[in-house]
Amino acid sequence: MARRTKAEAAATREALLDAAEEVFLEKGVARTSLEQIARHADMTRGAIYWHFRNKADLFQAMLQRVRMPFQELVEEIGDPSLAERPLEAIRLACLKGFERLEQPRYRRVHAILIHHCEVFGDIDPLAMQNEMAEEACGALIDYCGCAAHLGHLRPGLDPGVAGELLQAMLGGLFHDWLRNHERFSILERGTVLLDAQLELMRAPASG
């Protein structure tokens, strides 16, 4: 019985987050009340407060469902040889990220964060975006540093610059796609652009 109750509580929490996604996308975060989210989920506001302290807490929980820390993407690939192939690790992790972004939930939540969220109370969308971008850029710089150490990075290309170049390209692609997601596949376009960028950064083959 206890396990069932725990499972039911988890299902209620997920249903509230699903409802929040839909209402935030329609009305914007600042103009959405917890009462509206509860009604949309066919629940009471008390159900929300059982799981979340306030709207900011609910918003953060919604974001956590789509967070993709770069190192976790690499680890999910499960290929130990990537430690010796850092540029390929970047490539495969980015492709996995592109695949995730094409899932409706990932696209919806990122659209909410970028286009439907204003600074409101404890919610600062710019700070959240900066945190995610800085995490990704730091990981890219680290992997480019490993590539330089192994002689895989083009001579004269600073690893920090290489990481920032990748971050700029990926960020531009992401924002273009989020504005026009019906016009192109981020996986298809991203694969072409990423492969071209990595090829420009790669050390020429010896011999």
Image (cartoon, rainbow, N blue to C red):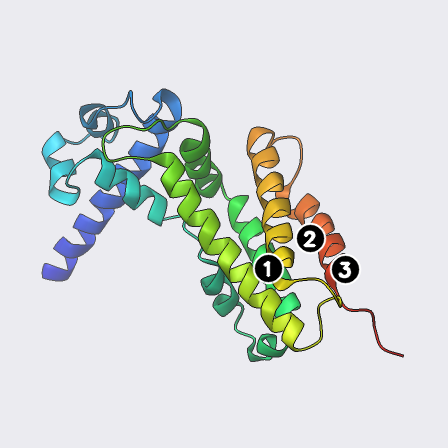
Q: Is residue 1 visible?
A: no
> Mark 1 sits on what residue?
160
Whether 162 is drawn above or below 172: the answer is below
Name the amino acid, label 1. Gly
Q: Which mark is residue 66?
A: none
How dense is the environment of label 2, judged by Cα within 10 Å: few (below 14), some, or many (20 and up)? some
Q: Position of residue 119 (x, y in %)?
A: 32, 28
Say which label, 3 or 2, has the lower sequence index: 2
Tell me the quarter of the image containing the N terminus: bottom left
- Report x, y in % for residue 14: 27, 44
**According to the image, label 2 marks what residue?**
194
Determine which residue is flagged by label 3: 199
Disc 3 is placed on an element classified as helix
For badge 3, the amino acid type reads Glu
- Asked which secondary structure carries label 1, the reply is helix
Q: Are marks 3 and 1 in contact (CB under 8 Å)?
A: no
- Residue at 77% over, 69% down: 203
| Quarter in which the C terminus is drawn | bottom right
CA gap, disc 1 and disc 2: 17 Å
Residue 133, compared with residue 122, is above or below; it is below
State if disc 2 and disc 3 touch (CB < 8 Å). Answer: no
